[in-house]
Image (cartoon, rainbow, N blue to C red):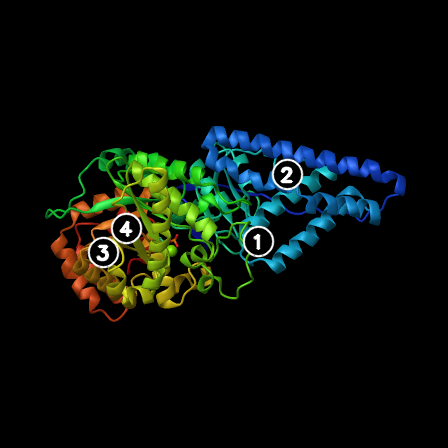
C-alpha cells in the first residue's frame, strides 16, 4: 500500500525516484580532555578547521554566484562571518585553554551555549539564523573529528529523491539536479532560503511533511509532487499511472507555455484581464516575462534582509528594485516594503520572544518602529520609480494612521531627494495590501489614502478563519472558499471600484483556477501569482465568459458553506473545461 504524505509545495515540478536519506546531523562528540601543553596544538587544529570551513563556504559562494547570481550567493555570508565572530572564536579558545577540552568538544560546547542563548533571547522563529548556525557547526565538527565531509555528495547515485529533516542553503547548492530529482523535508517553509534556491535550481521540493524521514526508507521508490506538496512512498500501479499521465501532461504543457504566454489575456466574451507575477528574487524576473507576466503584482523584498547580519544599503536595494523595473518596461511593478516578523526575521533585528508571532510585531508594524531600516527602503524605492512604473505596497495595514505615517516619512525623503536633485517619479503610487478583516471592513477609509488595493489572500484567509497558515495540521481548515472570505473579497472589490482605485489579488488563491474564476466574477480582473501558474490560468480564463463568472460569483456569495461555494463555481464553469486536467495542483480542492 502506498503511503501518502502531504506537506506544502515549495518548488514546482514532479519527480519519481528512490529515497536517499540525507543525514546532516550533529555528530557525536566524545568528551576528551587535554594536557595543558597540548592546548596550542588544539587551538591550531580549531583554527585550521575554521579556515577550511570558510574556504569551502567561499568556494560555494562563488560557485553559486556563477550558477545563480550575486543575490543568491549572498546567503553564505552569515556563515562565513560567524566563523570569525569573536563570540564563537574566543569562547571556543577559552574552553580549550581553561577547561582543557579538545578542539571539537570546546567548539561544540561554545556553540550549544550560543544556540541556547539565541533561542532564549531572540524570536523562536529565527529559523534562518539557527539553520545557518547549525549548518556551519556540523561542517566544522565533522572536520575536527576527521569524518568524511557530509556535504560531499559526489558519489550520489542518479535518480534520487532526497529526504531530510530540513535543508540548508549550502546543502541545496550541492545538489546536482542531474542526480537529485526532488527534495522532501520534515520541516521548513516555502520562504526558507534553501527553498528559494531549490526553485532557482528548478529542483522540485515539498516541505513541512512532518515525519517523512521516519516513514521513508532508504532506496524505497517514491513520487514527489512539488505542485501539490505531496510525497508518495511505495506508489502502487494507480499512483504510478497517474504520475505518468501527470508527467506527460506537464511535458506537453511545457511545450505550449511559450505560445500561451504571447496570447492576449481576454475572456471568451471579450473581458480583458491582467496577469502579473509574484517574485521572491529579482532573478525570477526573466522567467516571469517568459511565462507571460505583464508586470509584477508582488515583489517580496525580504530576500534583502533575512539571514543577513547587516542592513542592506540603499544602493543595493535601489539596484535590485531597478533591475526588476527594467525587466518590465511596459508594466507595473508593485514592490512590497519589508514584511518581517511572523516567520521571517533578519539577524540584525533583535527580536523579543513572542507567543503569537503572526499576531505580533510584523510587517508595517516593524517598519514603522525601525525608521533606519524603513527610511532607507523608502528612499531606494523612490529612486527606483525613475526607472519604470514602480509602485509601493504596504503589508498588513490595519488602519489609515499607518498609511498616514508612511506618507509623512515619504514626504521627508522626497524633500531630501529634491534638495539633492535626485530623480524620482513625482506621480508615484502608494497602495496597501488588504490582509486582515480589519482592513477589509475599513476599506472605504483606507481607499481615501491610497492609490490601490492588493488583496493578500494568504494572510486574509489566515486572519479571517483564525487558522495559522503554516500549521500543516490545520491545512484542511485553511480554505479560501469559506463564505466569510468570499464576502470580504466582494466587499473590497466594491469599495475599490467606488473609490476608483485598482483592486488586484496577489495571494496564492489567484493561481487556483476555480478561485481565479470566482475573482473574475467579483470583477477583480488583475491577478498576480507565482509565475509558473500564469500560463494555465491565462489559458483557462480565455475559455470562460465573464458573464458566467459573474453569475457564479453571485450564487457563491449566497452560499452557506465553502463546499457550496465551490459547487457554484464548478457549475458556473460548466463541462467545457476539465479543471482536473487544467491543474494538478488544485485538483484536491475540487468537490467530488
Ligand atoms: C498574502 O498574504 O497573500 C501575500 C501575498 O503575502 P505573503 O504570502 O508574503 O504574506
Ligand atoms: Mg501576506
Q: Quadrant of residue 14?
A: top left
Which structural element holds mark 2? loop
Using the numbered discs, state the Cα–Cα distance from disc 1 to disc 3 in whole angstroms: 41 Å
Crowding near pointer 3: few (<14 within 10 Å), some, many (20+)? many
- According to the picture, the residue beneath numbered tag 1 turns out to be 214
Using the numbered discs, state the Cα–Cα distance from disc 1 to disc 4 in whole angstroms: 32 Å
Residue closest to the eye, 571 or 118? 118
Disc number lying in front (1 or 3): 3
Mark 2 or mark 1, which is nearer the start of the sequence?
Answer: 2
Instruction: Point out the quarter of the image occupied by ligand 2.
Output: bottom left
Which structural element holds mark 1? helix
Which structural element holds mark 4? helix
- According to the picture, the residue beneath numbered tag 2 turns out to be 150
Label 3 CB, ligand 1: below 8 Å? no
Crowding near pointer 4: few (<14 within 10 Å), some, many (20+)? some
Mark 3 or mark 1, which is nearer the start of the sequence?
Answer: 1
Residue 456: percent from left, percent from top: 33, 56
Label 4 CB, ligand 1: below 8 Å? no
- According to the picture, the residue beneath numbered tag 3 turns out to be 519
Amino acid at each position: 500500500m502506498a503511503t501518502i504524505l502531504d506537506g506544502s509545495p515549495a518548488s514546482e515540478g514532479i519527480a519519481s525516484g528512490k529515497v536517499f536519506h540525507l543525514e546532516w546531523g550533529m555528530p557525536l562528540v566524545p568528551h576528551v580532555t587535554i594536557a595543558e601543553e597540548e592546548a596550542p596544538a588544539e587551538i591550531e587544529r580549531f583554527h585550521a578547521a575554521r579556515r577550511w570551513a570558510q574556504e569551502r563556504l567561499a568556494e560555494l559562494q562563488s560557485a553559486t554566484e556563477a550558477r545563480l547570481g550575486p543575490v543568491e550567493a549572498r546567503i553564505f555570508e552569515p556563515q562565513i562571518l560567524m566563523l570569525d565572530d569573536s563570540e564563537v572564536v574566543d569562547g571556543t579558545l577559552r574552553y580549550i585553554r581553561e577547561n582543557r577540552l579538545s578542539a571539537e568538544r570546546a567548539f561544540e560546547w561554545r556553540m550549544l551555549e550560543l544556540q541556547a542563548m539565541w533561542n532564549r533571547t531572540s524570536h523562536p522563529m529565527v529559523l534562518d539564523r539557527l539553520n545557518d548556525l547549525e549548518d556551519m557547526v556540523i561542517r566544522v565538527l565533522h572536520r575536527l573529528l576527521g569524518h568524511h565531509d557530509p556535504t560531499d555528495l559526489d558519489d550520489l547515485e542518479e535518480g534520487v529523491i532526497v529526504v531530510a529533516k530540513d535543508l540548508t542553503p549550502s546543502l541545496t547548492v550541492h545538489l546536482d539536479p542531474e542526480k537529485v530529482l526532488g527534495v522532501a523535508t520534515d520541516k521548513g517553509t516555502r520562504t526558507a532560503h534553501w527553498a528559494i534556491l531549490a526553485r532557482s535550481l528548478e529542483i522540485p521540493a515539498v516541505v513541512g511533511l512532518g515525519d517523512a524521514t521516519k516513514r521513508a526508507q532508504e532506496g524505497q521508490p517514491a513520487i514527489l509532487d512539488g505542485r501539490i506538496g505531496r510525497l508518495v512512498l511505495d506508489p502502487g500501479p494507480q499512483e504510478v499511472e497517474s504520475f505518468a499521465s501527470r508527467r506527460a501532461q506537464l511535458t506537453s504543457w511545457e511545450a505550449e507555455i511559450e505560445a500561451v504566454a504571447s496570447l492576449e489575456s481576454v475572456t471568451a466574451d471579450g473581458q480583458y484581464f491582467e496577469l502579473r507575477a509574484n517574485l521572491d528574487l529579482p532573478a525570477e524576473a526573466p522567467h516571469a516575462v517568459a511565462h507571460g507576466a505583464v508586470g509584477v503584482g508582488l515583489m517580496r523584498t525580504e530576500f534583502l534582509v533575512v539571514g543577513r547580519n547587516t542592513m542592506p544599503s540603499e544602493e543595493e536595494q535601489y539596484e535590485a528594485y531597478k533591475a526588476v523595473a527594467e525587466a518590465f518596461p511596459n508594466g507595473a511593478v508593485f514592490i512590497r516594503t519589508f514584511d518581517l516578523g511572523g516567520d521571517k526575521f533578519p539577524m540584525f533585528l533583535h527580536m523579543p520572544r513572542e507567543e503569537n508571532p503572526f499576531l505580533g510585531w510584523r510587517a508595517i508594524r516593524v517598519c514603522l518602529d525601525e525608521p533606519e531600516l524603513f527610511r532607507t527602503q523608502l528612499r531606494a524605492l523612490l529612486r527606483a520609480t525613475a526607472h519604470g512604473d514602480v509602485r509601493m505596497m504596504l503589508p498588513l495595514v490595519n488602519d489609515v494612521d499607518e498609511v498616514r505615517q508612511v506618507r509623512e516619512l515619504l514626504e521627508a525623503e522626497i524633500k531630501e531627494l529634491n534638495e539633492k536633485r535626485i530623480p524620482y517619479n513625482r506621480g508615484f503610487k502608494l497602495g496597501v495590501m488588504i490582509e486582515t478583516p480589519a482592513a477589509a471592513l475599513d476599506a472605504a477609509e483606507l481607499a481615501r489614502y491610497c492609490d490601490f488595493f492588493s488583496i493578500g489572500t494568504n494572510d486574509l484567509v489566515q486572519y479571517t478563519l483564525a487558522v495559522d497558515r503554516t500549521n500543516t495540521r490545520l491545512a484542511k481548515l485553511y480554505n479560501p472558499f469559506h463564505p466569510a472570505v468570499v464576502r470580504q473579497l466582494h466587499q473590497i472589490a466594491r469599495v475599490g471600484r467606488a473609490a476608483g482605485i485598482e483592486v488586484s489579488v496577489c495571494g496564492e488563491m489567484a493561481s487556483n483556477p476555480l478561485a481565479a474564476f470566482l475573482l473574475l466574477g467579483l470583477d477583480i480582473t488583475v491577478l498576480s501569482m507565482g509565475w509558473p501558474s500564469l500560463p494555465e490560468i491565462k489559458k483557462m480564463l480565455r475559455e470562460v465568459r465573464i458573464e458566467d463568472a459573474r453569475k457564479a460569483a453571485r450564487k457563491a456569495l449566497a452560499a452557506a458553506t465553502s463546499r457550496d461555494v465551490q459547487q457554484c463555481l464548478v457549475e458556473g464553469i460548466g463541462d467545457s473545461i476539465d479543471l482536473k486536467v487544467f491543474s494538478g495542483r488544485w485538483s484536491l480542492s475540487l468537490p467530488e
